[in-house]
Amino acid sequence: MKHCAIDVKNLQKVFTTRIGFWSRKTKTTMAVEDISFQVQEGELFGLLGPNGAGKTTTVKILSTILLPTAGSVSVLGMDVVSDTRAVRERIGFTFGGARGLYGRLSGRDNLRYFAELYGLEPALSRQRIPELLELVGLAGRSGDRVETYSSGMQQRLHLARALLHDPELVYLDEPTVGIDPVGARELRRTIKGLVACGKTVLLTTHYMAEAEELCDRIAIIDKGRLMALDTPAALKKRITGDTLFEIEMKAEDLPALQGQLDSLNGRLSLEVTDSYPNKKVSIRTAQPERVMQLLSPFLSEQRIQGLEVHPHTLEDVYVSIVQGESS
Amino acid sequence: MNARWLRLFWRQVDVQLRIRTFDPYSLLLFFLQPAIFSGVGMVLSRAAGQAQPDLVYTVIGGGMLGMWSGLVFTSTFDITRDRRDGTLELIVASPTSLAMVEAVRTFTNVVAGLASMAAAVAAAVFLFDYPLASVDLPGALVSLGMIVFGMWSIGVFLANFPVWSRITGSYVEFLEIPVALVCGFMYPIGILPGWMQAISTAIPIRWALEALDTALLGTGGIEYYLRQWGMALALSLLFWGLAHWLGLKIHDRIRVSGEMSAI
Amino acid sequence: MMQTLARYVRLYLVQAWFAYRALFAWSTPFNYFVSKFGFSFFSMVLFVFMGRFVGLTDPVYIVIGNILLIPATNGVSGISMTVGNERQFGAMSYLLGSPAPRPPLFLGRALFHILDSFVTVAVALPVAILLFRLDTSETNFALVLLCVLVTSFTTSGMGFLMGSVSLVNRDGWMITSTLSLSLFILVGANFPVESLPEFLQTVSYSLPMTRGIMAARAALGGADWAAIAPLLAGEVLVGMFYVALGYGMFRVLERRSMVAGTLDNL
């Protein structure tokens, strides 16, 4: 039976700042207004939202760096406010960007330092540090000063740092930002590997394809409030809208296709343009499965020279939710 | 102290020496600034018609200033730098308390500051022929140990302020010269007005430094030393207690304000 | 021509204001006040007691000298810190990569520091006069303020010189700090320049501030314009030399930093 790794109830976080040189007026900012969600053990949970939505604030509360203004947060059964040290021993986290490392120390020495902060025994440290450096692809540069690393390398070192003490729960705040596509793909593979090992991962990201590929469930937050929470597939079904098919075929096959599509009784729009020496047919429909069924014979008889399908993406969902257009 | 804390201690000392203590800023604080202040003292002596400057206060006092300035600035700079580099959050969020990390860092900074004192003593002995024969060596060494302990306790207390916020941290820097002023780093404390001397009675360094100066002049007795060291020790322990209490308050406060990563 | 001049003036003033605010924008009034006066005031008191210890019981010389040293701290440290901060926050590349003409871009950085210095001294001097009950019956205050204004300007050249080093060396502030501290010895703030060994006296007279402080002391003591004019003329000449040298070094090291790629190295 799976237990709840993270339990957030009515979380609120208000920041108070003073502005002005002489008068020092107080300004309050509601970074997180009222968020509740749960993350099950072994789950890869995504937290999405525009800049300033409250994602990083939420993650910082979960990692005990910030105290909530109101609400309760329990991590692995422990309260982040009263059981702070115990929580810290069992979680790992990275924040996006390259800050948070000692530039004048090598990658290896940075890990050694944090290993001591997390109380790793020397023997374990000696074993884990090379393993983690290998895992994140930095074994060859481990002796170089971090200030000579690229930002992508520093991000990867952060991941190694977060995993030093083999935490059960890992927060990854935009882990692939600034990393090249090849590196990002490898990092995603690593993240999947963490979940496969039984860890729970909470991921924040702006990359929709990444969230869709990795996450079991996704929460979308905006302006400090939870807007949606579901699996990627379920989220995509939340919005109505057409799927676009772009088909290239010979002109003489066109009447047969049109005849087949008549069975949809006009629940589609059809546009035919020239795509020498063929025709290009653009079909917009709210019944993509039915259209695929109708196209199957043409595909199997190789009467379609080219086919592109543009379904709803998670990005469409995200934009519609954030812009308030969800149905 | 168990093995884990010892390992952390040595690791933190190692990191601190490599990334902070031995950087150009320390060169300035430990050697250049004390040399300049001692230089002012020496030329003032010359302007006053004295053939030889007072080596205990003018030269060795400069070493004392170097130790203290080094502590004030490296300790505040440590936190400021951590805040700017983003490592402050990571340290706070680790299972090891920030207080522990700061205690070891501050200890490293204070002990490293002994280089300033060593340079000043070397200058006094080799450049100005200070007569070592008259020095009460055990008294001087114990007094120096008390100075180190006293500075350590004050340093740990003061380190809470830059953690609190960068503005409160900047106030700490302004303590550099006032403490040197009221504790009589570069002159006998007796020449200060009574009210200034009264302020320094609350600072452990003053008591230990008086004992050190007396030991260097070879004029102290055991009762005198015990009184001075007793005061230094008691006040140091008081500062430790205050540091602990303040640290707990600030740890919660910074997690409310979220200023840990603000540059 | 007029348009170009207007652009230069506007750029000079805008640069001056924003560069100055960038240094102090996070500050509170108390913090700003203490940063202006704190170190200078307490150092001055420390030197007074050091002087008392060796038998120099009249604090006036040290007090006046240290107050007049404040423009040096502002000019040298303030300007070089502005450059250093821009490197630290990654703005230097954008600044130097812009098409903005260099003279107002760089020289504008000194303006508010000069004004700041002037105001700081103008505030500190009366306070010192009251606190130490200095006899100002003979003082020519207009001349004193003129001396302060001139020295505020002349030390800005040193600020440029030190700031230019920060373009190629991340520890350039170290040289700045060393120089600022050296001024306690070298420019006659705490004792007459004649108390120094001869070779150091030569160094003193080649620095800005030395003649300015001498002129200000003379004006405080009631000297007239004819008496201090040669000192101020010398101060201005030395100052102009340092301004020209500082600006020149800035341009040379700007080029060098672009070749070596040191602009963004922290």
Image (cartoon, coloured by chain):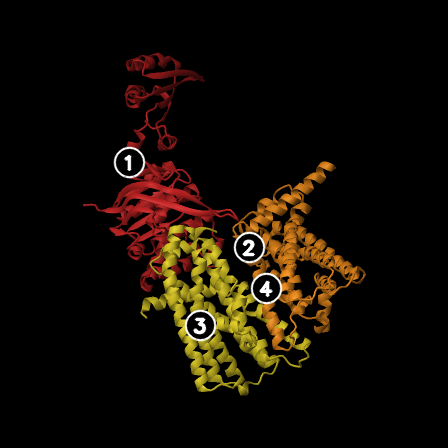
Chain colours: A red, B yellow, C orange
Q: Nearer the viewer, mark 2 or mark 3?
A: 2
Chain ID for label 3? B
Q: Amino acid at mark 1?
A: Thr
Q: Name the image quarter holding residue A57.
A: top left
Measure the C-alpha gap from mark 3 to mark 4. Answer: 26 Å
Same subunit, labels 1 and 3: the answer reads no
Mark 3 vs mark 4: give the one in front.
4
Give whichever of B46, A265 is nearer the camera. B46
Circles 1, 2 touching at the beta carbon (< 8 Å): no
Circle 1 or circle 2, nearest the eye: 2
SS at mark 4 in the image = helix
Q: Which residue is mark 1?
A: A231
Q: Is residue A186 something that shows in the picture?
A: no
Q: Residue furthest left?
A: A1
What chain is tagged by disc 1?
A
> Does residue C111 sit above or below A35 in this rendering?
below
Dots 1, 3 in contact, CB < 8 A: no
Q: Amino acid at mark 2?
A: Tyr
Gap between marks 2 and 3 measured at Cα = 30 Å
Q: Are marks 2 and 4 in contact (CB under 8 Å)?
A: no
Q: Which residue is mark 3?
A: B150
Q: Which mark is on residue C32?
A: 2
Assign a secondary structure to mark 3: helix
Compared to residue B137, the image places residue A246 above or below, namely above
Q: Are marks 2 and 3 in contact (CB under 8 Å)?
A: no
Q: Secondary structure at mark 2?
A: helix
The residue under label 4 is C41
Residue B20 seen in this snapshot: yes
Tell me residue C109's x, y (percent): 64, 50
Residue flagged by tag 4: what amino acid is it?
Phe
